[in-house]
Amino acid sequence: MSQDELKRLAAHKALEFVPEGEYIGIGTGSTVAFFIEALAQSGKRIKGAVSTSSGSSALLRQYGLPEVGLNETNGLAVYVDGADEVNHSLQMIKGGGGALVNEKVVASAARQFVCIADERKYVARLGKFPLPVEVLPHARSLVSRQLLKLGGEPELRIGFTSDNGNQIVDVRGLNIDQPLTLEDAINQIPGVVDNGIFARFPAHVLILGRASGAEVLYPR
Ligand code: 5RP
């Protein structure tokens, strides 16, 4: 099975976690694109979706799904999003698509975070995928020097500006044995807007697309 077929399997299974008549949050990326398509085709009626990127907003419009701003809601029933890596505790690295700041905000507003991913994203240890860090543009070099001191090798994502007008530095080589500690440590560097470790807001449910079908996992 191709990676896209596995993503599609996970995305379809996530429909079971979407209640009718509620506000939901929508992440960003190719797995989420399959989810938006599946949601539209299911005919399930949601009250509205809070989007995390211009890309996901465009897809919601394309499929005729109602979009609302986070401020118009008083919390979300569920948040559905992909990940670049996810471990057994359902902590993640996210931000490969550069939407990590909005993703963390919207995830934090949801009662349940459902992560959808193909099985290759499920890892014993986070950190092979370079960690995305969103930085204020004028603080890029300052932040990069601090990331070097933490043992990482920062590299500017060339030609990319986030939906918030910031830049992304991708960091290889970090030791992410203590995800929560590192998430907080990086966020204390002045000039960092947020980073792609999701340990403070891990997923509650992981749906993995496997060749044998969609598997639902809980943190352990
Ligand atoms: C975007 C993300 C995505 O969830 C992550 O990059 C996975 O993307 P895809 O579903 O395309 O593999 O964090 O910022």
Image (cartoon, grey):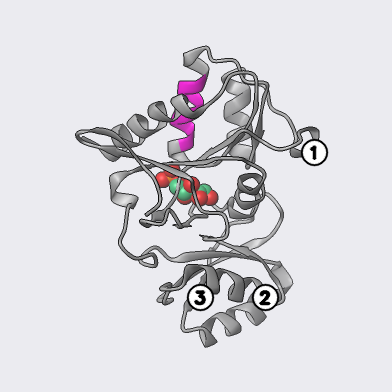
Marks 3 and 2: in contact by CB < 8 Å?
no
Q: Of discs 1 and 3, which sits in the foreground?
A: 1
**Going 73% across and 72% down the picture, which residue do you hit?**
138
Q: Quadrant of residue 127?
A: bottom left
Q: Of discs 2 and 3, which sits in the foreground?
A: 2
Instruction: Name which residue type carries label 1.
Output: Asn
Position in image of residue 164 (x %, y %): 71, 53
Position in image of residue 86 (x %, y %): 39, 54
Instruction: Name which residue type carries label 2.
Output: Gln
- Which numbered disc, 2 or 3, marks the residue that appears first in the sequence? 3
Marks 1 and 2: in contact by CB < 8 Å?
no
Q: Is residue 50 in sight in this rendering?
A: yes
Q: Is residue 97 in sight in this rendering?
A: no
Q: Which mark is residue 71?
A: 1
- Which numbered disc, 1 or 3, marks the residue that appears first in the sequence? 1
Are there few (<14), some (14-19), or many (20+) residues within 10 Å of tag 3? Answer: many
Residue range of the region highlighted in magenta in the rendering: 32-39
**Going 58% across and 57% down the picture, which residue do you hit?**
160
Question: How far apart, in angstroms, are the residues tagged by discs 1 and 3?
Answer: 34 Å
Q: Which residue is the extreme one toward the top? A: 43
